[in-house]
Amino acid sequence: MASDKIKALFIFEILGRPPEHIKETMELLVDKLGELEGVEINSKKIHEPKLIEKEGVKDLFSAFSEVEILGEDLNAILNVVFHAMPSHVEILSPNELKFKNFDLSSMLSALTVKLHRYDEIAKISIIEKNMLTKKLKEMEEKVGELEKEKEK
């Protein structure tokens, strides 16, 4: 391994059904990581989907994978984080990282853009939920009025 590369361990998790689809999706996710610029998959282990045994949960499966990646630089590692949203990241080597102000600014700007996108999605979802709740209440009132008229 070149001294300037960063070795990191990522854990990815997927929840869903059917188990065959989860495994296929996990394999696709891991394969796509190797296509990211500056990223090389060093090793990967994809675990078989397991049935979630929880009251109220029916036929739901969970699978996870452990993927060791060599990144050309910290930007490549962050690109994996932004692209695939792992549940865990551990930098294995080097023990210390040194980078320029410009590189840190670029990474923080990319993070900010991603956070703004999520904030926008959350705000739109809240507005849509409130509109649907209002419509539902209006419909409930109309149904109540119709039922009263039928009783007369």
Image: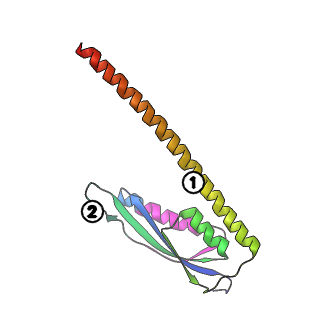
Compared across the picture, whether 144 is left or right of 35 comes to: left
Image: 53 above or below 10: above
Residue 10 lies, in percent from the top left, at 51, 73
Residue 53 is marked as 2
Residue in view at x 72 percent, y 68 percent: 105
Q: Which residues are magenta?
A: 23-47
| Quadrant that contains the N terminus | bottom right
Kindly state the secondary structure of the residue where label 1 is placed: helix
Label 2 or label 1, whichever comes before in sequence order: 2
Q: Amino acid at mark 2?
A: Glu
Residue 4: in sight, yes or no? Answer: yes
Rendered residue at 41%/63% (across/down): 23
Membership of 39 in magenta stretch: yes
The numbered mark at residue 99 is none
Residue at (67%, 76%) from the top-left corner?
73
Image quarter in which the C terminus is found: top left
Is 2 on the left or on the right of 122, as rendered? Answer: right
CA gap between label 2 and label 1 equals 31 Å
Is there any visible trace of residue 35 in the rendered image?
Answer: no
Q: Residue at x 36, y 22 (%)?
A: 142
Q: How many marks?
A: 2
Residue topped by disc 1: 118
User: Which kind of residue does numbered mark 1 sit on?
Assistant: Tyr
In this view, the residue in front, 89 or 48, is 89
User: What x and y, as percent, mark residue 114?
Assistant: 62, 58
Please tell me in which quadrant of the rendered image residue 83 appears: bottom right
Query: Which structural element holds mark 2?
Result: loop
Name the foreground residue: 24 vs 82.
82
Relative depth, front residue between 140 and 52: 140
Instruction: Classify 75 as above or below 54.
Output: below
What's the image's color scheme? rainbow
